[in-house]
């Protein structure tokens, strides 16, 4: 079991996947709530929001470990911390499940990173701010999947291609039908009325 000292304000363990680091792009660039400008780290997930978009990324490796690892209860990694993490090359292993950094020894003077093969990657970065839970919005209820919700699978590159084409419009409608029906995307301005169809994955 990975153990942390009693003083959680200075030390915790966390294994970041690449996507857990990239979630910072959804944080608020400038906000009246400073905590929204960083990446929220709690348990086995990281999340970021700017008040309009919320993205949470759960580390499935940590999820499977459960109580066998002590994880941070409430921490925010500042934008500058995540920026330096993003610039670090995550070592590739033959086992794709090992594609993450292990972060340990979060102290005031340095943060040490190393991969599972114990290659040390040291850097001095900003200390992730420890915050009180009530300062960061509790988003679990919002992220809960509706019991009666329908599920539609789509190739993200196809949908992104259509939405990028429509990025200059003030609003876009996304309409889904029955299971197996195509996704309909509509947009309109003073000069154009556009309809796009994206076929779902079967």
Image (cartoon, grey):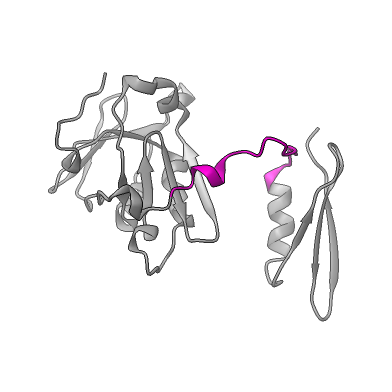
Range of the magenta residues? 138-156
Instruction: Give residue 79's quadrant in the image.
Output: bottom left
Residue for point 84% across, 75% down: 192
The foreground one among 103 and 8 is: 8
Q: Position of residue 171 (x, y in %)?
A: 71, 68
| Quarter where residue 42 is shown | top left
Q: Residue at x 45, y 52 (%)?
A: 48
Queried whether the magenta region covers residue 144, the answer comes back as yes
Q: Measured along the vertical axis of the image, is residue 105 above or below residue 36?
A: above
Q: Residue lying farthest bottom? A: 190
Residue 171 in the figure: left or right of residue 195: left
Q: Position of residue 92 (x, y in %)?
A: 42, 31
Q: Position of residue 123 (x, y in %)?
A: 21, 46
The secondary structure making up most of the magenta span is loop
Q: Nearer the viewer, residue 170 or 33?
A: 33
Residue 196 horizontal/vertical position (percent): 83, 57
Rendered position, 68 above or below 27: above
Question: What quarter of the picture does the C terminus occupy?
Answer: top right
């Amino acid at each position: 079991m990975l153990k942390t000292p009693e003083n959680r304000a200075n030390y915790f363990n966390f294994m970041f996947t690449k996507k857990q680091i990239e979630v910072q792009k959804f944080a608020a660039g400038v906000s009246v709530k400073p905590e929204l400008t960083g990446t929220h780290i709690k348990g086995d997930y990281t999340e970021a929001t700017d008040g309009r978009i919320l993205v949470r990324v759960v580390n499935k490796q940590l999820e499977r470990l459960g109580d066998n690892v002590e994880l941070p209860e409430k921490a925010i990694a500042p934008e500058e911390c995540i920026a330096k993490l993003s610039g670090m090359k995550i070592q590739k292993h033959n086992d794709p499940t090992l594609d993450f950094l292990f972060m340990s020894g979060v102290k005031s003077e340095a943060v040490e990173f190393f991969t599972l093969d114990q290659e040390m990657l040291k850097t001095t970065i900003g200390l992730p701010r420890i915050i009180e839970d009530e300062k960061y919005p509790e988003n679990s209820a919002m992220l809960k999947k509706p019991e009666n919700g329908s599920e539609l699978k789509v190739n993200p590159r196809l949908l992104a291609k259509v939405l990028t084409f429509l990025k200059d419009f003030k609003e876009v409608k996304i309409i889904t039908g029955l299971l197996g029906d195509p996704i309909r995307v509509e947009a309109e301005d003073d000069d154009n009325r556009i309809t796009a169809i994206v076929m779902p994955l079967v």
